[in-house]
Amino acid sequence: MLFKNSSKIKKIISFIAVFVLIFSCTVIFSDGNSVSTLSKLGSRGNEVRRIQSKLKQLGYYNGAVDGIYGIATQKAVRSFQKNCGIKVDGIAGPKTLKFLGLDSSAGSAGGYSSSDINLLAKLIAAEARGESYRGQVAVGAVVLNRVEHSSFPDTIAGVIYQRGAFSCVNDSNWYVSPDSTSVKAARDCINGWDPSGGAIYYYNPSKTSNSFMHSRPVITTIGNHVFCR
Protein backbone atom coordinates (compact mmCIF):
# COMPACT_ATOMS: atom_id res chain seq x y z
CA MET A 1 0.00 0.00 0.00
CA LEU A 2 2.85 2.34 0.91
CA PHE A 3 4.59 1.46 -2.36
CA LYS A 4 1.48 2.35 -4.37
CA ASN A 5 1.16 5.68 -2.58
CA SER A 6 4.83 6.43 -3.23
CA SER A 7 4.30 5.81 -6.95
CA LYS A 8 1.36 8.21 -6.99
CA ILE A 9 3.37 10.84 -5.15
CA LYS A 10 6.19 10.55 -7.69
CA LYS A 11 3.72 11.04 -10.54
CA ILE A 12 2.26 14.11 -8.84
CA ILE A 13 5.73 15.55 -8.25
CA SER A 14 6.67 14.93 -11.89
CA PHE A 15 3.48 16.64 -13.07
CA ILE A 16 4.16 19.64 -10.86
CA ALA A 17 7.76 19.86 -12.14
CA VAL A 18 6.61 19.88 -15.78
CA PHE A 19 3.99 22.53 -14.99
CA VAL A 20 6.58 24.73 -13.28
CA LEU A 21 8.96 24.35 -16.25
CA ILE A 22 6.25 25.35 -18.74
CA PHE A 23 5.23 28.30 -16.58
CA SER A 24 8.85 29.45 -16.28
CA CYS A 25 9.34 29.32 -20.04
CA THR A 26 6.15 31.29 -20.55
CA VAL A 27 7.42 34.01 -18.23
CA ILE A 28 10.80 34.14 -19.94
CA PHE A 29 9.26 34.55 -23.37
CA SER A 30 6.77 37.20 -22.27
CA ASP A 31 8.88 39.53 -20.14
CA GLY A 32 10.42 41.37 -23.07
CA ASN A 33 13.79 39.60 -23.05
CA SER A 34 13.00 37.54 -26.13
CA VAL A 35 12.19 38.61 -29.64
CA SER A 36 8.56 38.27 -30.59
CA THR A 37 7.22 38.48 -34.11
CA LEU A 38 4.33 40.84 -33.57
CA SER A 39 4.55 44.18 -31.77
CA LYS A 40 1.60 46.55 -31.88
CA LEU A 41 -0.18 49.30 -30.00
CA GLY A 42 -0.01 48.44 -26.30
CA SER A 43 3.00 46.10 -26.57
CA ARG A 44 5.92 46.55 -24.17
CA GLY A 45 9.42 45.17 -23.92
CA ASN A 46 12.88 45.03 -25.44
CA GLU A 47 11.65 44.36 -28.96
CA VAL A 48 9.64 47.59 -28.85
CA ARG A 49 12.79 49.41 -27.73
CA ARG A 50 14.69 47.94 -30.69
CA ILE A 51 11.94 49.04 -33.05
CA GLN A 52 11.89 52.54 -31.57
CA SER A 53 15.69 52.82 -31.74
CA LYS A 54 15.77 51.75 -35.38
CA LEU A 55 12.93 54.10 -36.34
CA LYS A 56 14.69 56.95 -34.54
CA GLN A 57 17.91 56.13 -36.36
CA LEU A 58 16.07 56.22 -39.68
CA GLY A 59 14.38 59.53 -38.88
CA TYR A 60 10.82 58.28 -38.45
CA TYR A 61 10.52 58.51 -34.66
CA ASN A 62 11.34 61.36 -32.31
CA GLY A 63 9.92 60.03 -29.05
CA ALA A 64 11.51 58.29 -26.09
CA VAL A 65 12.97 54.81 -26.49
CA ASP A 66 10.97 53.48 -23.56
CA GLY A 67 9.77 50.10 -24.78
CA ILE A 68 6.14 51.22 -24.83
CA TYR A 69 4.34 50.83 -28.16
CA GLY A 70 2.23 53.98 -28.00
CA ILE A 71 0.52 56.19 -30.57
CA ALA A 72 3.80 57.89 -31.56
CA THR A 73 5.49 54.54 -32.22
CA GLN A 74 2.50 53.28 -34.17
CA LYS A 75 2.50 56.45 -36.29
CA ALA A 76 6.23 56.05 -36.98
CA VAL A 77 5.74 52.41 -38.01
CA ARG A 78 2.91 53.38 -40.34
CA SER A 79 5.07 56.08 -41.91
CA PHE A 80 7.92 53.62 -42.40
CA GLN A 81 5.60 51.00 -43.90
CA LYS A 82 4.15 53.54 -46.32
CA ASN A 83 7.61 54.58 -47.46
CA CYS A 84 8.60 50.92 -47.95
CA GLY A 85 5.51 50.11 -50.00
CA ILE A 86 4.33 47.37 -47.64
CA LYS A 87 0.99 46.97 -45.85
CA VAL A 88 0.33 50.04 -43.70
CA ASP A 89 -1.26 48.78 -40.48
CA GLY A 90 0.97 50.21 -37.75
CA ILE A 91 1.88 46.69 -36.61
CA ALA A 92 5.53 45.63 -36.51
CA GLY A 93 5.05 42.10 -37.78
CA PRO A 94 7.68 39.85 -39.42
CA LYS A 95 7.75 41.72 -42.75
CA THR A 96 8.11 45.15 -41.13
CA LEU A 97 10.86 43.81 -38.85
CA LYS A 98 12.66 42.43 -41.90
CA PHE A 99 12.49 45.80 -43.67
CA LEU A 100 13.80 47.44 -40.50
CA GLY A 101 16.65 44.95 -40.46
CA LEU A 102 15.53 43.51 -37.12
CA ASP A 103 14.68 39.96 -38.17
CA SER A 104 17.07 37.20 -37.11
CA SER A 105 17.23 35.26 -40.36
CA ALA A 106 20.68 34.89 -41.87
CA GLY A 107 21.43 34.86 -45.55
CA SER A 108 23.73 32.86 -47.72
CA ALA A 109 25.81 35.50 -49.50
CA GLY A 110 28.08 37.52 -47.24
CA GLY A 111 25.63 37.06 -44.38
CA TYR A 112 22.82 38.69 -46.36
CA SER A 113 19.44 37.13 -47.07
CA SER A 114 17.80 36.70 -50.46
CA SER A 115 15.51 39.59 -49.51
CA ASP A 116 18.58 41.79 -48.94
CA ILE A 117 19.99 40.85 -52.34
CA ASN A 118 16.69 41.53 -54.08
CA LEU A 119 16.32 44.89 -52.31
CA LEU A 120 19.85 45.91 -53.27
CA ALA A 121 19.17 44.84 -56.86
CA LYS A 122 16.03 47.02 -56.88
CA LEU A 123 18.10 50.00 -55.75
CA ILE A 124 20.74 49.33 -58.38
CA ALA A 125 18.11 49.03 -61.12
CA ALA A 126 16.38 52.23 -60.05
CA GLU A 127 19.52 54.32 -59.50
CA ALA A 128 21.88 53.01 -62.18
CA ARG A 129 19.62 52.11 -65.08
CA GLY A 130 21.56 52.81 -68.28
CA GLU A 131 24.95 52.83 -66.55
CA SER A 132 27.73 50.36 -67.35
CA TYR A 133 27.85 47.13 -65.39
CA ARG A 134 30.80 48.48 -63.41
CA GLY A 135 28.77 51.57 -62.62
CA GLN A 136 25.86 49.45 -61.40
CA VAL A 137 28.09 47.46 -59.07
CA ALA A 138 29.60 50.71 -57.77
CA VAL A 139 26.16 52.02 -56.80
CA GLY A 140 25.44 48.82 -54.91
CA ALA A 141 28.84 49.03 -53.21
CA VAL A 142 27.98 52.49 -51.87
CA VAL A 143 25.00 50.97 -50.05
CA LEU A 144 27.19 48.28 -48.50
CA ASN A 145 29.83 50.86 -47.56
CA ARG A 146 27.14 52.78 -45.71
CA VAL A 147 26.07 49.63 -43.88
CA GLU A 148 29.63 49.34 -42.56
CA HIS A 149 29.97 53.07 -41.80
CA SER A 150 29.14 54.30 -38.29
CA SER A 151 27.17 57.30 -39.61
CA PHE A 152 24.56 55.17 -41.37
CA PRO A 153 22.11 52.36 -40.48
CA ASP A 154 23.68 48.92 -40.21
CA THR A 155 21.43 47.01 -42.59
CA ILE A 156 20.76 47.19 -46.33
CA ALA A 157 17.09 47.94 -45.72
CA GLY A 158 18.00 50.57 -43.15
CA VAL A 159 20.35 52.36 -45.55
CA ILE A 160 18.00 52.23 -48.52
CA TYR A 161 14.89 53.28 -46.61
CA GLN A 162 16.60 55.93 -44.50
CA ARG A 163 14.50 59.03 -44.94
CA GLY A 164 15.77 61.21 -47.78
CA ALA A 165 18.62 58.88 -48.72
CA PHE A 166 17.34 57.66 -52.10
CA SER A 167 14.50 59.44 -53.87
CA CYS A 168 13.96 56.47 -56.17
CA VAL A 169 12.12 54.54 -53.44
CA ASN A 170 9.22 56.94 -53.90
CA ASP A 171 9.14 56.64 -57.70
CA SER A 172 6.76 54.41 -59.61
CA ASN A 173 9.74 52.55 -61.10
CA TRP A 174 10.62 51.31 -57.61
CA TYR A 175 7.96 48.64 -57.91
CA VAL A 176 9.39 47.19 -61.12
CA SER A 177 11.20 43.91 -60.50
CA PRO A 178 14.98 44.14 -60.99
CA ASP A 179 16.42 42.36 -64.02
CA SER A 180 19.04 39.62 -63.96
CA THR A 181 21.88 42.11 -64.50
CA SER A 182 20.92 44.12 -61.41
CA VAL A 183 20.72 40.93 -59.34
CA LYS A 184 24.16 39.85 -60.58
CA ALA A 185 25.54 43.31 -59.76
CA ALA A 186 24.09 43.06 -56.25
CA ARG A 187 25.74 39.69 -55.72
CA ASP A 188 29.07 40.91 -57.08
CA CYS A 189 29.28 43.85 -54.69
CA ILE A 190 28.15 41.66 -51.77
CA ASN A 191 30.96 39.29 -52.70
CA GLY A 192 33.47 42.11 -52.36
CA TRP A 193 33.79 44.00 -55.64
CA ASP A 194 33.82 47.75 -54.99
CA PRO A 195 34.52 49.86 -58.10
CA SER A 196 33.60 52.97 -56.08
CA GLY A 197 36.81 52.76 -54.06
CA GLY A 198 35.03 52.85 -50.72
CA ALA A 199 32.62 55.69 -51.51
CA ILE A 200 29.66 56.45 -49.25
CA TYR A 201 28.10 59.03 -51.58
CA TYR A 202 27.52 59.37 -55.31
CA TYR A 203 25.69 61.83 -57.48
CA ASN A 204 25.05 62.86 -61.06
CA PRO A 205 26.60 66.34 -61.43
CA SER A 206 24.25 67.23 -64.28
CA LYS A 207 21.21 66.56 -62.09
CA THR A 208 22.41 67.50 -58.60
CA SER A 209 22.92 71.05 -57.37
CA ASN A 210 23.19 70.07 -53.71
CA SER A 211 26.17 71.94 -52.26
CA PHE A 212 26.88 69.23 -49.70
CA MET A 213 27.27 66.58 -52.36
CA HIS A 214 29.49 68.81 -54.51
CA SER A 215 31.69 69.49 -51.48
CA ARG A 216 32.55 65.84 -50.87
CA PRO A 217 36.08 64.60 -51.74
CA VAL A 218 35.86 62.79 -55.07
CA ILE A 219 37.22 59.25 -55.33
CA THR A 220 36.32 58.33 -58.90
CA THR A 221 33.88 58.97 -61.71
CA ILE A 222 32.10 56.09 -63.46
CA GLY A 223 29.73 56.95 -66.26
CA ASN A 224 27.34 59.67 -65.13
CA HIS A 225 28.06 59.23 -61.42
CA VAL A 226 30.69 60.87 -59.27
CA PHE A 227 31.63 58.72 -56.25
CA CYS A 228 32.94 60.41 -53.14
CA ARG A 229 33.64 60.17 -49.42
Image (tube, rainbow, N blue to C red):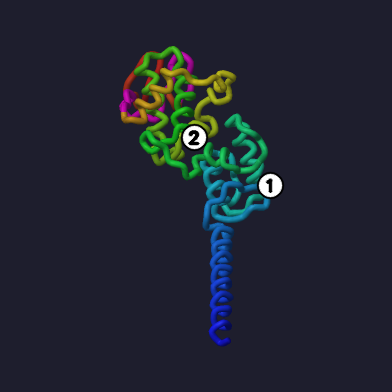
Q: Earlier in the sequence, mark 2 or mark 1?
A: 1
Q: Is residue 169 left or right of residue 228?
A: right
Q: Position of residue 120 (x, y in %)?
A: 45, 28
Give the prevailing secondary structure in the magenta stretch: loop
Residue 166: image x %, image y %? 51, 26
Q: Where 8 falls versus 29 (above or below)?
A: below
Question: Where does the magenta region start and end?
Answer: 193-211
Q: Amino acid at mark 1?
A: Ile
Magenta span includes 75: no
Judged left or right of residue 217, residue 157 is right
Residue occupying the far bottom of the picture: 2
- In three-dimensional space, the C-alpha distance between marks 2 and 1, rounded to whole angstroms, equals 24 Å
Q: Nearer the viewer, residue 150 or 215?
A: 150
Q: Based on the displayed image, in which of its 4 quarters is residue 154 positioned?
A: top left
- In the image, 182 versus 160, the foreground residue is 182
Please check the rendered image and state whether residue 198 is part of the magenta-colored stretch, yes or no.
yes
Which residue was labeled with disc 2? Answer: 157
**Category of crowding for the residue at label 1, using alpha-carbon neighbours closer than 10 angstroms: few (below 14), some (14–19), many (at least 20):** few
In the rendering, at what x and y percent does residue 121 appear?
Answer: 45, 24
Quarter of the view holding residue 201? top left
- Quadrant for the N terminus, please: bottom right
Q: Is residue 13 visible?
A: yes
Examine the image and state in which quarter residue 85 appears.
Answer: top right
Looking at the rendered structure, the secondary structure element under dot 1 is helix
Under tag 2, what secondary structure?
helix
Q: Which residue is mark 1?
A: 71
